[in-house]
Image: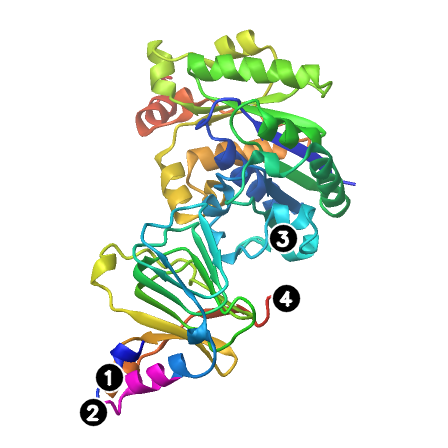
Amino acid sequence: MGEAIVITSGKGGVGKTTSVANIGAGLAGYGKKVVLVDTDIGLRNLDVVMGLENRIVYDILDVVEGRCRLRQALIKDKRLEQLFLLPANQTKDKTAISRQQMVELIQQLKEEFDYVLIDCPAGIEMGFKNAVAGADKAIVVTTPEIAAVRDADRIIGLLEAAEMEPPRLIINRVRPDMVKRGDMMDVEDMLEILAIDLLGVVPEDEFIVISTNRGEPAVLDGHSRAGQAYRNISRRLLGEEVPFLNWDSNNGFMAKLRRFLGLG
Amino acid sequence: MGVLKPEAKGRGRGKEIMEHLTRGSPLNRRTYLICRTVRSGQRYKYPGNVVVVGDVHPGGEIIASGHVIVMGNLMGMVHAGAEGDERAVVIAFSFQPLQLRIAGYVSRSPDGEKRKKKLYFREPEIARVENEEIIIEKYSLGGNKDGFKGSRRYQEEEEKNG
């Protein structure tokens, strides 16, 4: 029996879909059988980020409404054997699927996969409630901006009210240089406000834009800083103790040189 | 379609295509005209032929039981002959569909191919089923035969989608 994890944020554009794609690819890379479920009906994106848009024949609605078997709708990733995608429907809206249908679907997927990662739509309405309904655990994604943190706080409250175990936090798009100057909230500030466990910190990385446009998760690239962060997050989900990377001290040529000379 | 009779000189593929188009039933069906851009999430389903005067964007869907003609860029999904008619064809001014279905055949765009920027300068193409696969080739009525030598074959995902 696998584990269903919903990735949510409240606010849009903080990196839910990117996180789902990268964590999914990360877990599959470590040998787990993973399925990514896009519940953002009407505004699907996960298939585009994964570069699997052209393979969609059936979607989540076809499955829950019995027009096809679950197997037929699952799309195998082009790089990783163990990674599958269940795409959302693009022509309907969030009301097209019921809570009960979602719970049953996730239950069915959990029997076959080690991890079921659910990509949650932005907002706190029906789409969010459906996405959360079938999940065992939650990951909240936020960025170091007050608006995103405020929304994350709201979401954490809703998750707690749903009697789910406390969610874990991913802080996305952190810019160490700005944090250092004091222009951006640092990790400690955010943890203090949100008061949940930290799962990972992902630095701002241009490569995410490149990889998203290419339809290849950054986690598969050995050089990407964000990819490294997502690999660490995947390992933490697998239960490993991975230290948090300290971006501002071990990054950059000058810092390395200073350390080498014994000045850092 | 009677107006668009191929030229008498047409020993080229254009004539063949015209014959292919007019043979059998699809043309006898009604035709629905869509005079707008079909955007992501929009889906048109029609029991007959469909003509789009505009583009079909990625995520847009056209499902017709007859032919589909796109007078613009085809970038979304088109299903011609959706009720099982393998004679149905898809014609578009610029052909870059994410996925193309004719009757029970499905083909998808090649992976890793970058979208061409200058969509409007591409040539019209026609897709149809031949020898149990979807083939896409240059489209020109009554044109010369040379143009049809390089037919572009899309990857065949699966033979039948049932």
Does the rendering let one see residue A236? no
Q: Residue at x 57, y 27 (%)?
A: A8
For the residues labelled 3 and 2, the Cα–Cα distance comes to 51 Å
Which chain is home to disc 4? B
Task: Tell me which numbered mark, 4 or 2, is placed earlier along the sequence.
Answer: 2
Left-right relation of B74 to A235: left
Q: Is residue A225 magenta?
A: no
Judging by the rendered image, the residue that carries numbered circle 2 is: B9
Q: CA distance from mark 4 to mark 2?
A: 42 Å
Crowd rating for badge 1 (residues with CA inside 10 Å; few <14, some 14–19, many 20+):
many
Cα–Cα gap, marks 1 and 4 = 36 Å
Kindly indicate whether the residue at mark 2 contacts the one at mark 3 (C-beta within 8 angstroms): no
At horizontal 43% and vertical 58% (from top left) the residue drawn is B98
Report in which chain the residue with disc 2 lies.
B
Where does the C terminus of chain B fall, quadrant-wise? Answer: bottom right
Depicted A11 relative to depicted A206: above or below:
above
Q: Which mark is residue B162?
A: 4
**In the foreground, A149 or A172:** A149
Callout 1 secondary element: loop
**Dot 2 and dot 1 residues touching (CB under 8 Å):** yes
B13 magenta-colored: yes
What kind of element bears circle 3? loop
The image's mark for residue B142 is 1
On the same chain, marks 2 and 1? The answer is yes
